[in-house]
Image: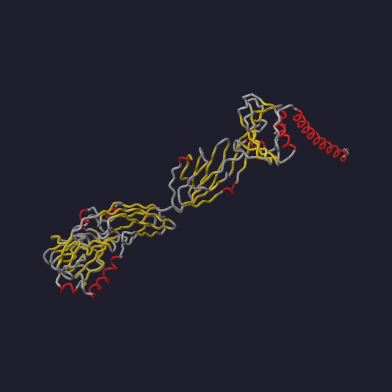
Amino acid sequence: MKDNGNYAGRVIILVLLGIVAATVLSAVILITLMVTPSKSRPIDVGNGVGIVSLTGGQNAWIDDSVEAHLLACAVSRLKTTDDTGFDERLCKLIFNSDGGEYFVTLLRSDDGRLAFELPTGERVTGRDRYIKRLLSYADLDNVLNRCEPDTLSVNGVTVYAYSYTLNGTSFSGEPIVFTGGEGDASRVELTVSEPVSILNADGGELCIYDENENIVYGGDVSAAEFKPESGKHYDYRISVSNGGKAEYHFSVTYRLAPTVTVSSSEIWQGDSFVMTVSGLLGRAITAETDLGCTVHIASDGDTARALIPVDHRVDAGNYTVIVHCESFDVSVGITVHQSDFEVQNLTVSTETANATVNSDEANTEYVNTIYPLFDSYDDTVYWDGIFVQPAEGSITTQYGVYRYTNGNTTATRHAGIDIANDEGTPIYAPNNGMVLFGGYLQLSGNTIMIEHGSGLHSLFMHMDSIVVATGDYVEKGQLIGYMGTTGYSTGPHLHYQLMIGANAVSPWRAFDGTAGFYQIKSGE
């Protein structure tokens, strides 16, 4: 039967003897180094020695201790060598003394011998087994190896590895495997308003999953061609192989600005253009412009369109349309070019003028009846094909004319065209649409307004009679009334006006098929 007390005592004595032996060995190394003849290179340890990685490993620190002083003494007293075989740079030693930092580089040859390179470029070496004994520091393997993978930078946000396995070599030449990772703690959730930019993932393989765990992209990180949808959530998983393997997981929710395009950015006075906004995903938008009009927008949830007029009163120059969507303001530039407009002098009898254009009652009636209809907007596009001229006859007044009436020195602008012919000449609908108004007004006489869709209206004035009623649906070429001279008129004619909202555009562009508003149907 064992004597447990004696056995435990013997174990304690052996441990103490081991500690004493290690201390004696360190002292022997120190004494050996101190008595070895050498040039004097005194190094002050100060408050410790730093061991700095050259390979992406972790840095280490040796506090002011016996080990630190042994290193300083070794470097100070080793012999200069002309051997050029020390090609591998392992790490830097920084002796952090009160007088400053003293940098020494640890070198290794192909056959495993060690040396130090001083700041002067001088290389020193000595008994290899002593140097290795001095450098058997616990964290040195981490310094000599890349023991943690790089972090990724995703739109400026740091993403740590979810898990990793890296291969390395110990100071003694044995294989080492470093493993770890942040796990779920590494999962970063980003909300971005621009494409994702991933740095430090060269050569990595990327898989992107949508909300239903379907793969929407798989391949090299640097070659990723992926068009995200705004408001959608995606899971990114990256695998990087570089001396091992590192996995990164992060999630991205995209809140992207909508895309705004126009059918043309070069517009002539009296024309129009179509603005298209895509990538909305149900988000509400508004738009504004300095072109002097209200922008009416029709949206189907993901795409919105608007007809935007550039009437005869808009000066030539540069303008902007701005679309507001959540926190995004997206602008597009428009250049307006000058059109040629005629000048006309008109004489109207005092009796006719006083009963119409000079009458407060007539003007109030017209404004209260017709102006609200300018703001009507039907999402349905009724028109089909090119608009036709609504009546035969001679053109007595063109669109956009500067008109001086009864010698007045201030011109008014003519917002439509006047087609003159015999009283009773048939008038036809220029295209399909809904009749918004059909009736008599003191200022404009027998009047019709037709909504063709998307805020595009036809206005007919001074008719002798009307054969359609408010609320009727009319087709292109359908008879709607007859030419006359009612209201503010000097003879039988039709005043025909084409409007987008409250802004008049040139009927001739509608008749010849060049009007910009036709582009709204090209996107259907």
Q: Which of 215 and 220 is in front in this view?
A: 220
Q: Which of 176 and 97 is in front in this view?
A: 97
Residue 327 position, x and y percent, is: 44, 57
43 sits left or right of 479 in the view: right
Tell me, yes or no, if residue 463 can be seen here: no
Residue 17 position, x and y percent, is: 82, 35
Residue appearing at x 20%, y 60% in the figure: 399
Image quadrant containing the N terminus: top right
41 sits left or right of 324 in the view: right
Instruction: From this view, report whether residue 153 is shown above or below residue 172.
Output: below
Residue appearing at x 21%, y 58% in the figure: 507
Q: Quadrant of residue 135?
A: top right
Residue appearing at x 64%, y 29% in the figure: 122
Instruction: From this view, report whether residue 89 is shown above or below residue 370.
Output: above
Instruction: From this view, report whether residue 172 is shown above or below residue 98.
Output: above
Tell me, yes or no, if residue 457 can be seen here: yes
Residue 63 position, x and y percent, is: 71, 41
195 sits left or right of 149 in the view: left
Which colour assignment does the render follow?
secondary structure
Instruction: From this view, report whether residue 389 is shown above or below residue 219.
Output: below
Q: In which quarter of the image is residue 452?
A: bottom left
Quick one: which residue is furthest to the top in this view? Answer: 83
Residue 271 position, x and y percent, is: 26, 56
